[in-house]
Amino acid sequence: MSDSNAADGTGRAEGDGEGRVPGHDRRRFPDISSRAYEHPADRSALVALRKLSGFDTVFKALSGLLPERSLRLLFLSDSVRVSERQFPHLHTMLLDACSILDLPKVPPMYVTQDPQPNAMCVGLDEPVIVVTTGLVELLDEEEMRAVVGHEVGHALSGHSVYRTILLFLTNFAVKIAWIPLGGIAVTAIVTALREWFRKSELSADRAGLLVGQDLQASLRGLMKLAGGNHLHEMNVDAFLAQAAEYEAGGDLRDSVLKIMNVLPRSHPFATVRAAELKRWAESRDFQRLLDGHYPRRAEDKDASVTDSFRESASHYAESVRSSKDPLMGLVRDIAGGANDLGSRLRDTFTGRSGGGPRDAARGPEDGPRDEPRDGEGKG
């Protein structure tokens, strides 16, 4: 075992036993289950992915095609392994992150030369964390700590397997043409994997906050991913105002364009991630977690799938109810029994508005239209 894999000679990160990281004022979360920080949409997307026709075929084929050793040899041969002697500050952050989240085994971590700021946690049997030089150069110490915690969160959640499959499906599609599925089926699986991947990022952002325990550092890091290292030219509050404008602005056409823009992406937009993380940090669930009230790994085997579905459904219902996005407003109308979907969509996409049969049919009891107002949801 390399020195990058051992905190105490056993490959396990150790805390002080009293809920604190040695030498720091950050709280530990002994035996924490990934359920404590996983975004409900993450779990729902993963369940949907597993049920997708053909996914088992691809999963089994790639599991046999991609031996764990090949990935490790790739990083070992062309990257720098983090240890006490190489990138020691990252090594310390990794040990701290594994201690805080009580990850049983510290995964190997590598730095690879790439100006594009990025990090990933991959591996079929055991996770491997990789960060690029572009990311190391972009972020300060506390921002980087949140990123390391983000990747350790992926490892604790078991995300690395599915992320590895997506990596090979998107980067080596020609080489896997022999998989006994049609191109449309593989495309559907890639689309579903990307949808889950984006949701899993929201979960890992939460893990990063649990490790860094500095919301402003987490938000700054996301802002830098969007705008570069000119921190003196940027403002976190203004960045969050952008998120509010993005989530609420425009009409149905903008809502559709948002969906189309995000489909080919592996990550959610940085403003959306920042807004989601801030909402969670201000929630009662987060405060209870900090107070030590969280699900334990020892209880995972008894966790109810039904409860998980119920939580996800409740999350989506609340998201639709509170969203200022025009498309979500339309969903509320449909759920409430609106019968004018066709005319509303036609009016929106043809630029028509105002009177017509729809308005003539409205009675006093119908109340005002549920249309977005100018400036609603802005900063």
Image (tube, rainbow, N blue to C red):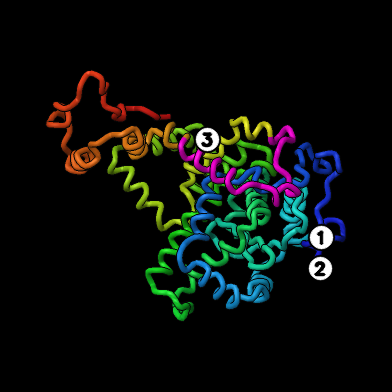
The vertical placement of 161 against 89, above or below, is below
Residue at x 59%, y 57% (from the top left corner): 119
- Tag 3 and tag 2, C-beta contact below 8 Å: no
Find disc 1 in the rendering and name its residue. Answer: 11
Callout 3: few (<14), some (14-19), or many (20+) C-alpha neighbours within 10 Å? some
Q: Residue furthest bottom?
A: 178
Find disc 2 in the rendering and name its residue. Answer: 1
- Tag 1 and tag 3, C-beta contact below 8 Å: no
| Position of residue 361 measured from the top left corner of the image (x, y, whole percent) | 16, 27
In the rendered structure, which amino acid carries the disc numbered 3? Val
| Position of residue 373 measured from the top left corner of the image (x, y, whole percent) | 31, 27
- Residue 62 on the magenta segment: no
Residue closer to the observer: 267 or 163: 163
Label 2 – label 1 distance at C-alpha = 8 Å
In the visual, does 350 lie left or right of 105?
Answer: left
In the visual, does 154 lie left or right of 276?
Answer: right
Q: Which residues are magenta?
A: 289-317
Mark 3: which secondary structure? helix
Mark 2: which secondary structure? loop
- Tag 2 and tag 1, C-beta contact below 8 Å: yes
Please identify the dominant SS of the magenta region: helix
